[in-house]
Amino acid sequence: MAVIGGGVSGLRAARRLAEAGADVTVLEASPRIGGQVHTVEVAGVPVDTGAEAMHLGAPGVTDLLDSLGLTDDMVTARPGASWIVTPRGLRRLPAGVGPAGPTRLRPVLRSGVMTVPGLVRAGLEPIVAQRVGGIDLSPGEDRSVGDFVGSRFGGQVVDRFVDPLLGSLHAGDVRTLSLRATTPSLVPAATAGRSLVRKRRPARTGAAPTMSFVSWREGLDRVVTALASGLDVHTDTPVEVVERLTPGEGRERGGYRVVVGGSDPRTLDVDGLVLATPGDVTARLLAEVSPEASAPLTLTDRASVATIVLAYPRHVVEALPAFRGTGVLVPSRVGSLLKAATFLSTKWPQLDHPEWYFCRLSAGRAGDDRLASFDDDELLARVRGDLRTIIGLDVAPRHALVQRWPHAMPQLTVGHPDRVATARAALPAGVTIAGSSYDGVGIASCLTSATRAADTLLDHLGLTATQGDRPV
């Protein structure tokens, strides 16, 4: 079998297949594995320049980390609130506000983020939900997150909370992002016509705190290394063509021929394929094998983003008031190149360095082409200027690293789940797809997607996943 793509999705799928007894080869076009998980040293300290953390709330993630021997060394993000940029200056992100909007109204009322008319409109959400009732989100139906949340809470909640949280996470426009694809947790309440605001419940006592976001002292590359351990992985190995083999061409069941280019061109005949590649790459590879599966995947655009890591002499900046929070979220209406900043030395114990204070800045959104017009020096100067305007940090960093991620963020716009379902239904037997372009951004989503893809392929081949490796 072959897995095309050596990111987290591809490595997870390959490991799942190998543990079931399959002979698996991983083919990665770039010089390294890990995809958007990438740890580099800044001032001699490992810092992640792609994905920043793993979320333990997704089903099966903890079991997988246990099986990889990673649980004992996890580092948990410190509790704390981010700042949010508002017309009234920086305000704390209220408790109970997530990427899909508020689940509690009282903290929002006290936050100072919204105007009085905006608060009055948001407070009507339970009444609006009861009056409007449920919406149809069955297959073939969808709605943007911004439109739905705006219909419930009003436009100000969308602009001041959903846009800087969910929009930043996806580097996209919340008024085009799919409700079903990007906020599936809202679907039950949306279809049932229930309020999105939780009713107050008595606090439970004696419950242990639940870990949420974790990393490792060596960075998230630790996960990549563990996933890849023991696998047959080939980097600098771009796949140019996938061809279908019919029974009788030297293979009893047929299968697929993978044509590899690059410096070592060759072919590889396999029984099955996992395409853990971006949607446009997958569409190209499927163009001859299954045009019906290829066509819907061409419709997923991708945004270019960049991560900038800065290291400051700690004694110079640690008294800055903004660093009492874990970061800053910037609404798109502000117009800055900077969309978010994470104060790494406040948020992560392993980056709480005695000499250096680390900040991580993010730039790039769908529809904003400015990144491509700036070289690294100008990009650095502009995001530093935005940071100075927002939090008053007017100190030159001692170390700076710019990591660009061209066309890296898939835009899961309205109708995305149906487009992916159409593509999957048209896939020929023995081919599966996995990754963020199909099942959502974030490491946990990629792991879940990869496990399902591998299990589908195992079922096709009559193999069974090992009992000790629980589904993710």
Image (spheres, rainbow, N blue to C red):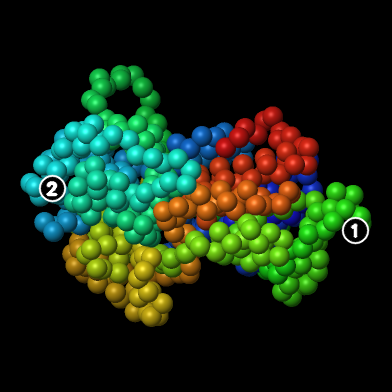
Q: Is residue 300 visible?
A: yes
Seen in the picture, residue 470 relative to 167 is either above or below; the reply is above
Residue at x 61% of width, y 41% of height: 452
Residue on which disc 1 sits: 249
Which amino acid lies under the numbered mark 2 shown in the image of this protein? Gly
**Pointer 2 local density, CA inside 10 Å: few below 14, some 14–19, many at least 20:** some
Q: Quadrant of residue 362?
A: bottom left
Q: What residue is rendered at 38% in x and 25% in y? A: 208
Percent position (x, y) of residue 449?
Answer: 57, 45
Q: Indicate the position of residue 170 as horizontal and vertical percent values.
A: 40, 56
Q: What residue is shown at x 36% (from left), y 22% (from top)?
A: 207
Left or right of 334: which side holds 135? right
Secondary structure under tag 1 reads loop
**Circle 2 sits on which residue?**
118
Front-most of residues 425 and 344: 425
Quadrant position of residue 173:
bottom left
> Within 10 angstroms of label 1, few (less than 14), some, or many (20 or more) residues?
few
> What number of labels is visible?
2
| Image: 185 above or below 432 | above
Disc 2 and disc 1: Cα gap in Å?
Answer: 67 Å
Disc 2 or 1, which lies upstream in sequence? 2
Does residue 104 appear to the left or right of 274 in the view shown? left
Which part of the image, by quadrant, shows the C terminus? top right
Secondary structure category for the residue under label 2:
helix
Q: How far across and down, in percent of the image, does residue 285 sit?
A: 67, 64
Point out residue 337 in the picture as x, y percentages from the top left corner: 30, 69
Q: Amino acid at mark 1?
A: Glu
